[in-house]
Amino acid sequence: MDKIAINGGKPLCGEIAISGMKNAAVAILLANIMVEDECIIENLPDISDVNRSLDILSAMGATVTRLTHNSVKIDSKNIIACSAPDELVKKMRASYYVLGAELARFGRSSVACPGGCDFGVRPIDQHIKGFEALGATVSVTDNHIVAVTAGGVVGDSVFMDVVSVGATINVMLAAVKAKGVTVIENAAREPHIVDTANFLNACGAKISGAGTDVIKITGVPTLHGVTYELVPDMIEAGTYMVLAASTYGKIKISNIVPKHLESISAKLVEMGAQVIEDDDSVTVTRSGDLSPITVKTHPYPGFPTDMNPQMCVLMCLANGKSRMIEGVWDNRFRYVEELKRMGAEIEVADTVATINGDPQKMQGANVRAIDLRAGAAMIIAGLSVKGHTEIEDIFHIQRGYENIIGKLQAVGADIEIISD
């Protein structure tokens, strides 16, 4: 099994270009199930979750053609209902978008329970509630989710009990071809929801309000093909911003939307880093010590839960007591034990981690990538402290970061993949 090997303690300088957004990519790719035409998707990140999404489409009967390293043509006219292979669906969380897309096109769906990063119980009750409001009968049996309508999806009002990105996108997908109008209230507002809505609108859908907490969808009978470029990945950008601050480096992060990163930029500045914004880039540097802070994760536009582990590394390198309060996933802090192997002093009580920061106590160690973002945090930690670090279970990292080794080597990191 491959590992990542790091020799850390070196400032990193240079420029890193950000790839297309993972969370938008998987939603938009699986939304092609509904289109019944040819679409070209550009700025696709070359990561395992994207490749698995394409494999699911191929297995369902779509014709998938790689045009370039980061663009693909999908002909979805011959997709067969309820044909997504269990073994592929179980490898990624976002495979649940097959449900909404199949309901829209066929009026029925059957999908294995999704996989992906394990944060404990991650219910899809809001997805099911939304599908039922649109006229589907939903059952979960033998690790499968089955949804059936009597004569297709019918528009209605859907109120989300909690703000859920996945449920917002899934109900939006299901409603695109519904009879009548659907209104989603208390909707999530993340940029990849906006990107998915923009893609669908380009295909002929009628969606308004994406990016606010009320989304209105007027059903249309058909969708047509389109060429569409994905938005840049805000979490990849945020990861490299934290890396620059943690290594006393100076990194220009390009091909971004600075507005998407405002909550991250604000916290880095509060800790003592310098963040200089341009039209489509930010440059992050640090010269002095880091100050301790308190961060609480929230749905967008708040501080993202997917930046919790990376930011916690920065807190470990600050002088003094910081707090990370997790407001989205209760079981997010499983990575803490790995940072403790490197000398971090962290105590977790329920959804609050208290970090006694001391950069002198941190050093390289053998650790694991517990999940995707925790794996990115281990890379940041390994590059930021002196000594040798080896990271196992790197398949989690490869799910969401395109060419992360090459991008880091280009800014001076001593990092490589080795075989065990």
Image (tube, helix red, strand yellow):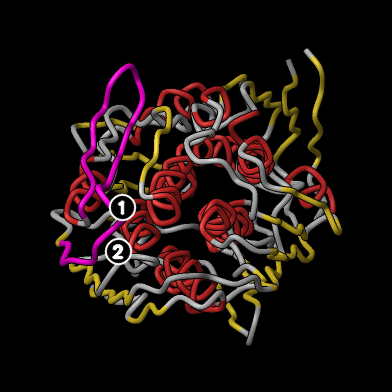
Residue at 56 percent across and 62 percent down: it is 35
Answer with mark 2 or mark 1, whichever residue precedes in sequence: 1
Residue 273 in the image: state x and y as whole percent: 53, 67
Q: Quadrant of residue 118?
A: top left
Q: Quadrant of residue 288?
A: bottom right
Residue 283 in the image: state x and y as whole percent: 65, 73
When the figure is inspected, residue 165 is found, relative to residue 115, above or below; the finding is below
Residue at 40 percent across and 79 percent down: it is 206
Image marks 2 and 1: residues in contact by CB distance under 8 Å:
yes
Residue 153 in the image: state x and y as whole percent: 29, 57
Q: Nearer the viewer, residue 222 or 257?
A: 222
Residue at 75 percent across and 20 percent down: it is 2
Instruction: Give the CA distance from mark 2 to mark 1.
Output: 9 Å
Determine the secondary structure under disc 2. loop
Q: Which residue is mark 1?
A: 167
Left or right relative to 99: residue 352: left
Farthest residue to the front: give it.
Answer: 151
Residue 25 shows in the view: yes
Residue 188: numbered disc: 2
Residue 386: numbered disc: none
- The residue type indicated by label 2 comes to Ala
Number of residues whose C-alpha sits closer than 10 Å to that of mark 1, classed few (under 14), some (14–19) or many (20 or more): many
Q: Which residues are magenta?
A: 135-158
Q: Nearer the viewer, residue 408 or 257?
A: 257
Residue 143 lies in magenta, yes or no?
yes
Residue 368 in the image: state x and y as whole percent: 56, 23
**In this view, the mark in front (2 or 1):** 1
Farthest residue to the bottom: give it.
Answer: 279
